[in-house]
Amino acid sequence: MSSRVSDVMTAAPQSLPLDATLYEAARIMRDKGIGDVLVTYAGRLCGLVTDRDIVLRAVAESRDTSLTPLGDVCTAELTTVHPEDDTDTVARLMSEHAVRRLPVVDAEHHPVGIVCIGDLALANGDSGPLPAISKAPPNN
């Protein structure tokens, strides 16, 4: 049985404005034990930056993370979902776009949550390793 996104998402996701630096995003990721930060402009979602983006698009290129704005490395073309969407739709979109997380936005494109593949596994009662990994605290 399919659930609604609002039932499984992480509400109030971490976000930063487009002109914030990679250093700021990395600090939030470390402090909160997360791997992504949503990027906003005027309160609306305009991108997503992951720990992997920071490593591959900045650190590996010798860019100064304290000077590089999120807008330079974030993924701007995002697939998003809404709180009232069903989790079957989320799973299909993740599969089609080969992503593990999708931002959740309201009608005005303000970020209200994020849903990841682990959330779907937990919602479906998956007893495999994915739910356990999703529940585990970060090892930083």
Image (cartoon, rainbow, N blue to C red):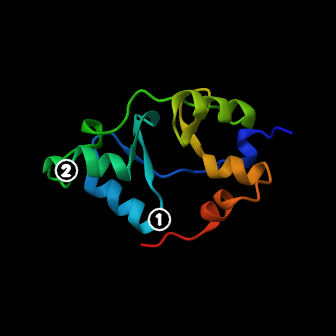
Which is more toward the observer, 87 or 67? 87
State the residue position of label 2: 60
Which is more toward the observer, 135 or 18? 135
- Tell me what residue is drawn at x 66 percent, y 34 percent: 90
- Tell me what residue is drawn at x 48 percent, y 52 percent: 14
Residue 101 lies left or right of residue 131; in this view the side is: left
**Residue 13 seen from this side:** yes
Tell me residue 82's x, y (percent).
Answer: 65, 32
Mark 2 or mark 1, which is nearer to you?
2
**Residue 85 seen from this side:** no
Which residue type does callout 2 highlight? Ala
Q: Name the element at disc 1.
A: helix
Query: Which mark identifies residue 32?
Result: 1
Tell me residue 43's x, y (percent).
Answer: 45, 37
Residue 109 lies left or right of residue 132; in this view the side is: left
Separation (CA) of disc 2 from disc 1 = 24 Å
First in sequence: mark 2 vs mark 1: 1
Query: Which mark identifies residue 7?
Result: none
Instruction: Count every numbered label the image shows and give the total.
Output: 2
- Image-quadrant location for residue 57: top left
Residue 23 lies left or right of residue 83; in this view the side is: left
